[in-house]
Amino acid sequence: MNDFNQKVNDFTTLILETPEFAELKAATEELKKDPKATKLIDDVQAKKETVMTLQQTGLPVSKNQELDLQDAFANMRSNPTCMRLIKAQNAAIQIARKVCNRLTVATGIPFSRGGGCCG
């Protein structure tokens, strides 16, 4: 393995050893054991996908569809397993953003603007 690949592997190992990623792993494992939480997340995803598809095709989203999506989000947020996962995901995203911000500062190239993995 060349030196660059080794450094990437070492960096990845460091990131994965952070408390944020340990919590993300634990929250993901907890979700696997909680079918109710899994169903709540799946429900949000399905309703969100429906609304987004309608919006992207220029079709109207009904008030009932909007309310159903809001209710699905509320139900998901009221579940402790779901909230643990959401918080863990947000913390892991912050780590990724810090990496992108460092790359931006070091190179002058805006890695963290305009979308992409860190935008």
Image: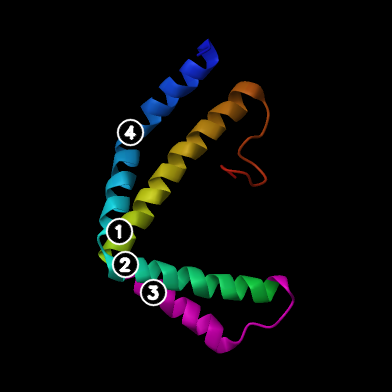
The spot of residue 85 in percent (x, y) is: 34, 55
Name the kind of residue labelled 1 in the image. Leu
Nearer the N terminus, badge 2 or badge 1? 1
Name the kind of residue labelled 4 in the image. Thr
> Residue under circle 1?
31
Tell me, yes or no, whether the two marked residues, 2 and 1, touch with CB atoms within 8 Å: yes
Name the kind of residue labelled 2 in the image. Ala
Q: Could you say which disc has been placed on residue 18 in the image?
A: 4
Which-is-in-front pick, marks 2 and 4?
Answer: 2
Q: Is residue 45 above or below residue 5?
A: below
Q: Which residues are magenta?
A: 56-78
Nearer the N terminus, badge 2 or badge 4? 4
> Residue under circle 2?
37
> Residue under circle 3?
74
For the residue labelled by badge 2, is the local secondary structure a helix, a strand or a loop?
helix
Label 2 to label 1, Cα distance in Å?
A: 7 Å
Q: Is residue 92 above or below residue 39?
A: above
Q: Residue at x 47, y 77 (%)?
A: 70
